[in-house]
Amino acid sequence: VHTRNPATESETLSECFRFLNLTSRSFSTVIQELDHELLVPITLFYLVLRGLDTIEDDMTIPLDKKVPLLRNFHNTMEIDGWQFHESKEKDRELLEKFDVVIAELKKIKEPYYEIIKDMTVKMGNGMADYAQNSEMIKNGVQTIEEYELYCHYVAGLVGAGLTRLFVTSELGNPKLAERPSLTESMGQFLQKTNIIRDIHEDWQDGRRWYPKEIWSKHVDRWEDLFDAQHREQAIHCISAMVLDALKHVEECLFYMAGMREQSVFNFVAIPQGMAIATLELVFRNPDVLQKNIKITKGDACQIMLECTQNLHTVCEVFRRYARRIQAKNDPRDPNYLAISVRCAKIEQFIETLYPRQ
Ligand code: PS7
Ligand code: MN
Ligand code: MN
Ligand code: MN
Ligand code: MN
Ligand code: MN
């Protein structure tokens, strides 16, 4: 069911949907299938955060300009007619015509608006902290704790905002609001997968999100990860990162068990299904170190079908990919045993949810 109504849509709203399709690889379809109550608020939430992320990612904006832009973005998003013409990023057109997002934000229900604004304050400040910090120490994220705090700012907060939108609109189980760690895991799992996969692209852009606490166990210098001479160690480093991401799986499945409306279920489940498939794709795959890799269209289609049914079919996706990770696991990998245990635990958890006869 398409919930958009182009006949009654204002020009600025149509423009917002054009930006959604232009800027989002993974979210545009699932957002546009959302229940009518949340369709526009979540589209605008996405565009506000995409605008913020475009500023964060733009390495041509000097830090003394970038930091205040990030910290004040929640005020900026209230200034009628505001546009930004100094970005060189791929998604810069959104910032150049950001006034359309601002115009539409003023029309949504107050509680939805407040949630979006609150998340923008927190994310903008978190991004600014890390932008300043990476400049000071010049060698990226150090500990797993710092890595997870970054993932909290850019994805855990998105999850928190979305959960509040689901609960406020009564499309989500109110009990979800009492389980913030489940929500956090949903964001951590997506963001960690994105960071693991984007290693090469991020490195070329002068960014590094893998924590030193993990990569330093495998190579002495960060650059060595991209050097053919250290290929084996680099693959082991990726395995360590995949193992770390897999610790969130049970909480993600638990969160999805709390969905009660089909369009919201699909919206949260599809990205999670894509993420577990992406983890399997990057696992022990040297291509990650050389180029951007993506799951095939065929796999994406199948995941889309399975993740738009019910928790059971989503669990089947997770079980299938956990088994494929197991099958690719190599005893020479220092994380072999831990990965094996982790995958078995995931399978076991699914088995307790849906015992097979
Ligand atoms: C509001 C739907 C559902 C409880 C733009 C969805 C970048 C991985 O780094 O575009 O450019 O490669 O490939 C999305 C939890 C956030 C976390 C975060 C807003 C799920 C700005 C998404 C998305 C929580 C910061 C997109 C985490 O990847 O990034 C809405 C529940 C934006 C969610 C960023 C990343 C998302 C991301 P990149 P991508
Ligand atoms: Mn970013
Ligand atoms: Mn980005
Ligand atoms: Mn990325
Ligand atoms: Mn991306
Ligand atoms: Mn990117």
Image (spheres, rainbow, N blue to C red):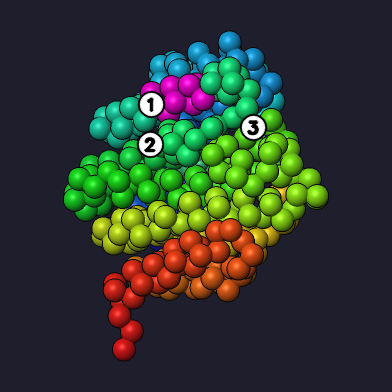
Tell me the element at label 3.
Answer: loop
Amino acid type of the residue that numbered disc 3 sits on in the rendered structure: Arg
Q: Residue at x 41, y 16 (%)?
A: 75
User: Which tag, 1 or 3, sits closer to the chain's start?
Assistant: 1
**Does any portion of residue 267 appear in the rendered image?**
no
User: Quarter of the image containing the C terminus?
Assistant: bottom left
Judge the density around disc 1: few (<14), some (14-19), many (≥20) Cα neighbours within 10 Å: some
User: Quarter of the image containing the N terminus?
Assistant: bottom left
Res 208 → quadrant: top right
Relative placement, left or right, of 277 versus 145 is right
Above or below, 101 against 178 in this view is above
| Res. 17 mark | none
Q: CA distance from mark 1 to mark 3?
A: 21 Å
Amino acid type of the residue that numbered disc 1 sits on in the rendered structure: Lys
- Verify CB contact (< 8 Å) between mark 1 and mark 2: yes
Relative placement, left or right, of 302 versus 187 is right
Q: Position of residue 240 (x, y in %)?
A: 55, 52
Judge the density around disc 3: few (<14), some (14-19), many (≥20) Cα neighbours within 10 Å: some
Please report the bounds of the magenta region as a residue range: 120-130
**Does any portion of residue 322 appear in the rendered image?**
yes
Q: Position of residue 313 (x, y in %)?
A: 40, 72
Tag 2 residue:
157
| Res. 207 mark | 3
Check mark 3 vs ligand 2: CB closer than 8 Å? yes or no. yes
Tag 1 residue:
122
